[in-house]
Image: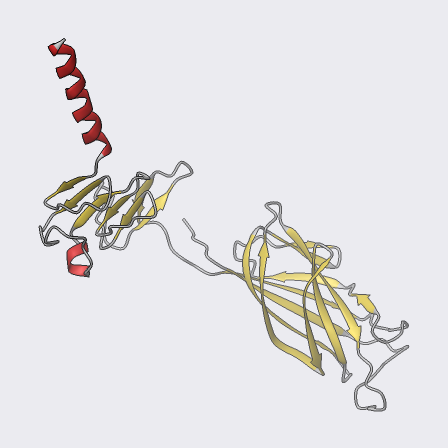
Amino acid sequence: MKIIVITIAIMSIFTINLSAQVGIQTQAPQGIFHIDAATNNDNAVPTTKEQIIDDIVVSKEGFVGVGEINPNQKLTINGKIKITDGTQGNGKLLVSDKDGKASWRGDVSIKGKYAGWRLEGTDLNRTTPNNDTISLKGTSSIEDNSNIGLQMITNGVHVPHGKYFIVMNGDISSSTEYCLILVDLDGKKLTYAAYAEWLSGYTFFLEVENQAGSDVTLRWINRPLGNQTYYQDFTGQSRNWWYSLDFHMMGNMIF
């Protein structure tokens, strides 16, 4: 009977210890496991930067904090880190493969990828009433594709998956237009610019979420101005026109 009682008592002690917080050099642990390396918490909850910066804490969620007593990720480090796996070197970047395994790479450079697309034509002989949209149909050209991979489609451009900062310019020659130019992404309005006489430096952000890429096309709308004849209606008149979009790809690395 005594052996059974002693065994039960020992098991109870282990159960209590396993469910308790463990503190090393501190009597006020802030997680399942807490080390106060510098012993500067005065056995109380650390509150100052100096008290926290040397602490290591494992939370009940299994998060580890180094220099952080309330980690909210698997590993939270407050301070500098050093990774020496034999591939490190001056000017190298830490790069991950598809499985998350990282190594230092020296053949990586961060470069801007740029490409320009231009659509031009003569068919703006507006026969529809004011404020009706005209899908612009003309000749496409791509300049300085610079690894983006733009592709011309009928009256538009196919843009690969990614994020882009875009600058748009354009003009209708021999006219003083007052109009809207609309940018469509896969047939739906993405953005538009209202301008008079010529369009210069209109900027917008484009994110192509489709992994297969998306199509960009343009539409045009004339805007009536009553008796202000300075701005031309040019119903029944053809005009040469052009619009260009400069694509600047964001957040890319070249290996």
Q: Name the spot of residue 86 as percent of width and height, x first.
A: 21, 41
Residue drawn at x 43%, y 53% is 253
Q: Is residue 24 above or below residue 185?
A: above
- The answer to whether residue 220 is left or right of residue 35 is right
- The answer to whether residue 224 is left or right of residue 249 is right
Asked where in the image residue 235 lies, by quadrant, the reply is bottom right
Q: Name the spot of residue 41 as percent of width and height, x first.
A: 12, 53
Asked where in the image residue 98 lies, by quadrant, the reply is top left
Residue drawn at x 78%, y 83% is 175
Q: Nearer the viewer, residue 88 or 54?
A: 54
Residue drawn at x 21%, y 44% is 84
Residue drawn at x 58%, y 52% is 149
Q: Name the spot of residue 189 as percent of width and height, x first.
A: 71, 62
Find the residue positioned furthest to the top.
1
Colouring style: secondary structure
Q: Nearer the viewer, residue 39 or 143?
A: 39
Q: Nearer the viewer, residue 117 or 49?
A: 49
Q: Is residue 149 above or below residue 2?
A: below
- The answer to whether residue 185 is left or right of residue 40 is right
Q: Is residue 214 above or below residue 16?
A: below
